[in-house]
Each structure stands twice: as C-alpha cells, then as structure tokens.
Amino acid sequence: MSVVLLERREKGAGQPQPLQSRETAVLHFEALGRGCPVIFLHTWVGSWRYWIPSMQDLVSSWRTYALDLWGYGDSAHDPALYNLDDNVALLDGFLEAMGIDSVSLVGHGLGAVVAAEFSRRCPQSVERLVLVGFPLGREQASDRLWSIPLADLAGWLAGRVEDRTGLQEFPKTDPVAVEANLRSIQGTGWKGMVRGLCMPCLLVYGGEDPSVRPLSSEDEQRWPDSVGWVSLSGCGHFPMLDDSARFNRLLADFLRMGVTESPRTLQVKEGWRRRVR
C-alpha cells in the first residue's frame, strides 16, 4: 500500500510543520489486523518487511502498520528528505492521512530515534512507546556503528539472523539515506529526553547486539517508573527475528498493560510474568 504525502519543507523544533504543496512524495506502508493502532518503524537498513511476524502475532487485537522511512523500501528516495525532521514529519503526515489520533509506536534503531523524537514533539498522539536497539547516548553505541563501511553494515547488524526472509529488501535501501541518518544523530544524547516522556516506554535490547549496549541495572534508580527495559539474551540487533516468540510475547504483554502499570513489572523468566515491586 502507499499514500501520497506532501513534502514538508519548513523545519522546527516543536510540532511538525504544516504540509507544503511544492512537491509530493510517496510513502509505502503495509497494514494488518483490527483494533487499536500500532505502528512499526524499521532500523538503519531494511524495510517494513521484517516486522511481518510481529504484525501477524498481534493481528487478533491490534491494527498494525509498518512503514518504509524515506530512502528505504518502496518509499520515496529523495536525499532532501534524509533527515530526522522529515522522517518525523513522515510519521505525523501518515497519522493525519489515516485519521489516527492516538497510536502505540514500536521503533527499531533508526525507527526508534524517529519514534522517540515524534513522541517528544507530539506526546498527545502516542499512547505507548517501544524502543528496540536504541542508542540513548554516544557511550552506549558501538564506535563501529559510526565508522563501518556502508557495504558491510547490513551484514554486521544481521549477523545472528538465521532466517533472512524478512531482510530480502535490504538492497532497496539508499546508502545515502543510511549515511545521512547516522551522521545526523551521531553524538546526540537521548537519555534526558526519554526520561521526560509522559507515556509508558519500554526499551528492548538484544543481549548480543553489536551496535548498542543495554542499560546497566545500576541505572534503574535514575529513571522514572514509566520507563522500563529488557535485555533479551541470545539475540542480536534483530530480536524480533532471532527469537520472535519471546519478543512478540513481550510486546503483546506491554501493549496490554494498564496505563498506571510500570513497564518495570515485566521480567524475563521461562515465560513472561509480572513482577510486583
């Protein structure tokens, strides 16, 4: 599926700016299921496609959407759009075009950066937030993420993935988009911003993700109860593919939580159980 969005030319630090009429850009997305809306946003390389197992798992209770960001998959490849502001505007324009007032966001890598920034600018539009493989600060990200040759990036990030079916659209990625997006956030710190978000937020890390290190347990007291995090052992940068059953159970459990419950009540054991603090 695709939707034609008018390109946003004005930039601003607050609300996404009004749509301009000078040009149009096509945004590609796929949708599945019925219920409350959930939007999936992909990582530095790839497309909407690797979210299929998660979308299928949520199909009975949620209306899921997976988007291709600018320069990825079948969305418009236009270097003028390869920046954080225009990707945030892409998400805002999609919600407006689809008539969605409130949504849960699941962002991964680059998609996590876009989802977090959108949540900061438009908190009234985000019910819940899941950030997967999100580098909260320069010290948390591997130095190699910023320096690895683009030709090697996809293989490095997906090294632990056995079933590559969902990654078949990697070649559609515009290398200029990858380079521009990585450059635009290098050195940016997100900890303070995430701490200040008003909606429940869950940080998910692969225990063996080569690109980003999980938060340490000693950080727990510095964060509000509205923010929780989980490290999935045995998983790399793509935990939704490395262990889809475990990732999807976690995701569904978080989406079902009451608005007053803390994400920290989620704990990894043999199955997902609630921990009472």
Image (cartoon, rainbow, N blue to C red):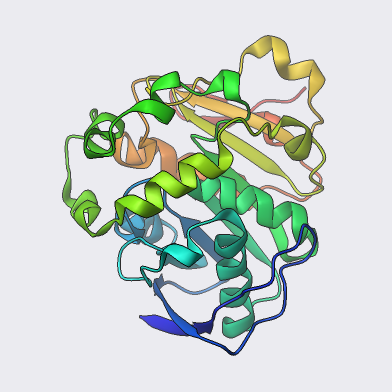
| Residue 86 in sight in this render | yes
Does 261 sit above or below residue 107? above
Residue 16: which quarter of the image? bottom right
Q: Is residue 17 left or right of residue 91?
A: right
Q: Is residue 17 left or right of residue 132?
A: right
Please give the name of the residue rendered at 76% of the width and 49% of the height, measured from the top-left corner. Answer: 199
| Residue 226 in sight in this render | no
Residue 171: which quarter of the image? bottom left
Q: Quadrant of the C terminus?
A: top right
Does 178 sit above or below residue 118? above
Q: Nearer the viewer, residue 206 or 210?
A: 210
Residue 117, horizontal then vertical, whole percent: 67, 51
Q: Is residue 149 left or right of residue 103?
A: left
Please give the name of the residue rendered at 75% of the width and 52% of the height, measured from the top-left corner. Answer: 120
Q: Nearer the viewer, residue 159 or 277?
A: 159
Residue 242: which quarter of the image? top left
Residue 155, horizontal then vertical, whole percent: 22, 34
